[in-house]
Amino acid sequence: MHELSIASALFDIVSEQAKRFPGERVIGVTMSIGGVQALEPDAVRTCFTLLSEGSAIAGAELTIERRPIVVFCRRCEAEREADTNFACVTCGNYGVRLVGSQAMSVEKMTLRSRENTMDESHGR
């Protein structure tokens, strides 16, 4: 299950970052994934929840943002966003080349302290 490996990697990253703030609790995590990543967000959330039970991350809300698919459109002669069928959203052309698919990254980790909430941004 691909989602389990992604959730496990995410858990490891967030756990490592959370160690920098002893005594505080992670209450939110925002991650982004490339547009062509074949992930089921609900499955990633479920796996992340199960992995985080009993840790400083337990109960944290996981938000998953999907980045657009970016292609080079031969008709437009420019980089454009593509739909899920890999057609240029500007002109509808299928004569495109995938520019790249960014892997996952942790965009934000929100911590709750006794006095306030802090945001820490960390990319991978």
Image (tube, rainbow, N blue to C red):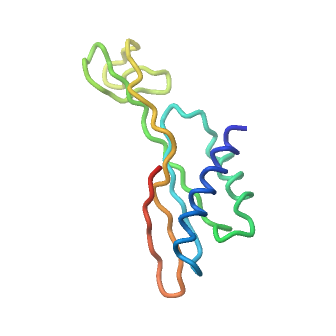
Q: Residue at x 36, y 30 (%)?
A: 81
* Number of numbered tags placed on the structure image: 0
Q: Indicate the position of residue 13 as horizontal and vertical percent values.
A: 57, 57
**41 sits left or right of 110 in the view:** right
**51 sits left or right of 29 in the view:** right
Position of the N terminus by quadrant: top right
Q: Indicate the position of residue 65 as horizontal and vertical percent values.
A: 49, 48
Camera-nearest residue between 46 and 56:
56
Camera-nearest residue between 63 and 92:
63
Q: Indicate the position of residue 27 as horizontal and vertical percent values.
A: 57, 70
Q: Residue at x 28, y 13 (%)?
A: 75
Q: Which residue is situated farthest in the bottom direction here?
A: 115
Indicate the quadrant where residue 11 lies: bottom right
In the rendered view, tell whether residue 1 sits above or below residue 79.
Answer: below
Camera-nearest residue between 105 and 75:
105
Q: Indicate the position of residue 110 as horizontal and vertical percent values.
A: 50, 68
Q: Residue at x 38, y 29 (%)?
A: 70
